[in-house]
């Protein structure tokens, strides 16, 4: 307020408030020095040391914010940039600065599949607690993702890895399997893309996921609905009949198996 302190206020500040402020500053400095390593056994030792150095610098740049380093830099020989994630109050555009890919995240990301995976293999300036996944994931979202991935594979889309990453994460969540970390995701994606017919494996993953994670009644209803939809489209676009027949195959397989179980 640009007002001078009275003598009594000066005395109170010196005797009590300044001591508390010094104590808080010491605690904050200690927290900055304490970095938290997750999945250390999978991180290259030299990358771990450099990540610690970078993270301390980044923590000073983004004061008071949760910052962590994750991605291929930690474990791969080859990498494009260093993925840095900064939790911010507001969503911002990514930045590329001196080899760092700065990704801004909002607090709702803590409850996402992405964070559940990323936190398993990272270097963080804060301790990461367990968070409940609140992202909307169900049979409808998984069917949509399967359709998108099938189409990406069919036309050799360059961004197929991103779609496949989300597909594998949703599959793990629905199947109630452990969420894979970023290295496990990379290895699974690379393995699928190396085989001659990746679409066939994706169809098998889809069927397995539905059988393990969705009730028979709900699964049969959803599969029948999507088959009816494709059947209508096939009459209108007959030249794509083979494509639609191929993509529908796992839906029919789920119905056959679940009808027997149900």
Image (tube, rainbow, N blue to C red):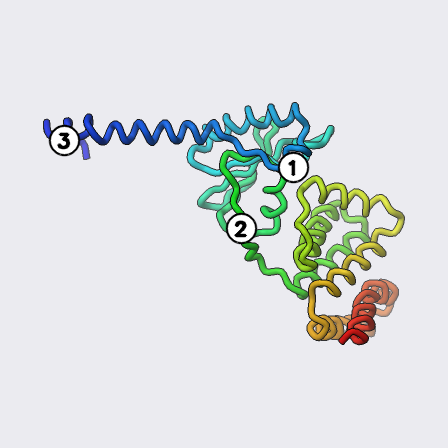
Q: Quadrant of the N terminus?
A: top left
The residue tagged 1 is: 71
Please report the residue visible at 46 percent of the width from the left and 33 percent of the height from the top.
62
> In screen coordinates, is 7 left or right of 200?
left
In the image, which is nearer the foreground, mark 2 or mark 3? 2
Q: Position of residue 95 (x, y in %)?
A: 56, 36
Q: Position of residue 226 (x, y in %)?
A: 74, 71
- Identify the disc placed on residue 138: none
The residue tagged 2 is: 131
Q: Position of residue 199 (x, y in %)?
A: 83, 55
User: How many residues crowd mark 2 within 10 Å: few (<14), some (14–19), many (20+)?
Assistant: few
Query: Of marks 2 and 1, which one's residue comes earlier in the chain?
Result: 1
In contact (CB < 8 Å): disc 2 and disc 3: no
> In screen coordinates, is 83 left or right of 155?
left
Closer-to-camera residue (17/167): 17
Please report the residue visible at 82 percent of the width from the left and 74 percent of the height from the top.
235
Please report the residue visible at 55 percent of the width from the left and 24 percent of the height from the top.
53
Quarter of the image for residue 30 reads: top left
The residue tagged 3 is: 9
The secondary element bearing badge 2 is classed as: loop
In the image, which is nearer the foreground, mark 3 or mark 1? 3
């Amino acid at each position: 307020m640009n007002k001078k302190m009275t003598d009594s206020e000066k005395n109170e500040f010196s005797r009590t408030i300044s001591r508390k402020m010094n104590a808080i500053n010491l605690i904050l400095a200690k927290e900055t020095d304490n970095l938290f390593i997750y999945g250390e056994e999978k991180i290259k030792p030299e990358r771990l040391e450099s990540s610690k150095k970078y993270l301390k610098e980044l923590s000073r740049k983004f004061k008071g914010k949760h910052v962590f380093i994750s991605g291929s830099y930690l474990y791969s020989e080859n990498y494009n940039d260093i993925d840095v994630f900064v939790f911010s109050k507001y969503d911002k555009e990514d930045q590329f600065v001196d080899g760092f890919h700065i990704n801004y995240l909002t607090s709702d990301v803590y409850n996402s599949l992405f964070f559940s995976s990323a936190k398993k293999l990272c270097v963080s300036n804060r301790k990461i607690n367990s968070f409940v996944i609140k992202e909307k994931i169900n049979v409808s979202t998984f069917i949509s993702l399967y359709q998108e991935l099938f189409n990406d594979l069919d036309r050799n889309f360059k961004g197929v890895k991103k779609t496949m990453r989300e597909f594998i994460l949703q599959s793990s969540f629905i199947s109630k399997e452990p969420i894979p970390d970023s290295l496990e995701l990379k290895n699974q994606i690379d393995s699928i893309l190396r085989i001659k017919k990746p679409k066939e494996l994706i169809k098998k993953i889809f069927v397995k996921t539905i059988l393990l994670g969705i009730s028979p009644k709900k699964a049969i209803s959803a599969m029948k609905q999507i088959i009816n939809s494709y059947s209508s489209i096939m009459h209108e676009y007959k030249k794509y009949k083979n494509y639609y027949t191929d993509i529908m195959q796992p839906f029919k397989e789920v119905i056959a198996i679940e009808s027997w179980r149900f």
